[in-house]
Image (cartoon, grey):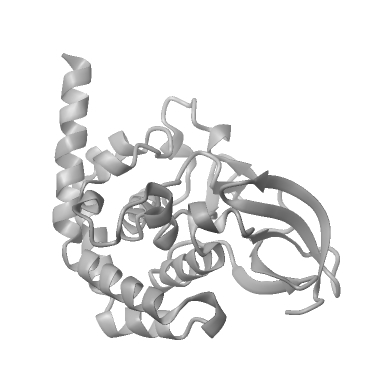
Amino acid sequence: MLNKWNLISCISTSRKVGKVWVVSNENNQSIVGYFKHPTQTSIGFSGPLVANEYLSYLLGKELSLPMAETILAEINTIQGIISLKKTQNKKLYNWNKIKNESNPFAHILHSKELIKMFVFDVWIVNIDRNNRNIILYKTDDKDLYDYYLIDHGLSLLGAFTWKGKDWNNQYWDDVYKYNRRYLKGLPVFIVNHQDILYSYVQEVQALHDNRVEEIIEDLPFHLLTASHRDILKKFLIERKKHLHRIIENWLKNYQQHLSNFTT
């Protein structure tokens, strides 16, 4: 996608994660996206950002999750990733818009599928799901929002690098220990819908190992080293097998937390 996009403004500079720019399409200025790229410094903190983002996008799309359309891009010789606004002509919000409602999930279309998002985040060890990286927009029913997911740079190799833990460390089996960042209200919502929780675990586990390997192997050569590809294949396939136990352990720990909080 060389020379197809114009940089408009830098909206975020992070020593540990990289830079984010607003960009527009050269052929259609109304098409706006967000161009994210690592720096030499950020790679040491968050790993291969572009690979983390793009692989997470492909896996999420494979599971029919509402991912922001994500494309590889090169702008002014800088290689990165562009996350496109899913609804170019609608006002966008994030979870902060509804987080203080008595029941924010009542305002979300297909709200129970947020549990699928949680299961997916556990599978890819996304340590940065928060109120800002789920994007909301109004549906035709003015009382409801639809949504899509962005920002998966601190997943997979990004999570391993950020936490300083090898991919095969038992540390990653304890979700309650390695991650306390959730959409406000989501953990309690999950506890109240455990039957759906495990159906989504089964959906992830039904994704064939060969398909996972194929998605990783089909990534452009420059995104990942051969050793990183091998690590990701082993990690994702092995974690998928044990996902039920990992989720079950999180649920037990979180319910214990709720019990301690109310006694």
Residue 86 location, quadrant: bottom right
13 shown above or below 104? below
Q: Residue at x 57, y 62 (%)?
A: 68
User: Whole-percent x and y of residue 113?
Assistant: 37, 54
Residue 8 in the image: state x and y as whole percent: 84, 56
Q: Provide residue 200's location: percent of width, then percent of height.
A: 27, 59
Compared across the picture, whether 28 is left or right of 128 comes to right
Q: Does 81 sit left or right of 145 as displayed?
A: right
Q: Residue at position x 53%, y 52% from top? A: 147
**Vertical position of residue 236 compared to residue 155: above or below:** below
Residue 226 seen in this snapshot:
yes
Residue at left offset 73%, top offset 59%: 88
In-front residue for pair 140/45: 45
Could you say which is closer to the camera, residue 39 or residue 22?
Answer: 39
Instruction: Residue at 58%, 33% (x, y): give it.
Output: 97
User: Based on the displayed image, in which of its 4 quarters is residue 63 positioned?
Assistant: bottom left
> From what the image shows, is residue 144 above or below residue 217?
above
Q: Residue 66 placed where, x, y %?
A: 49, 61
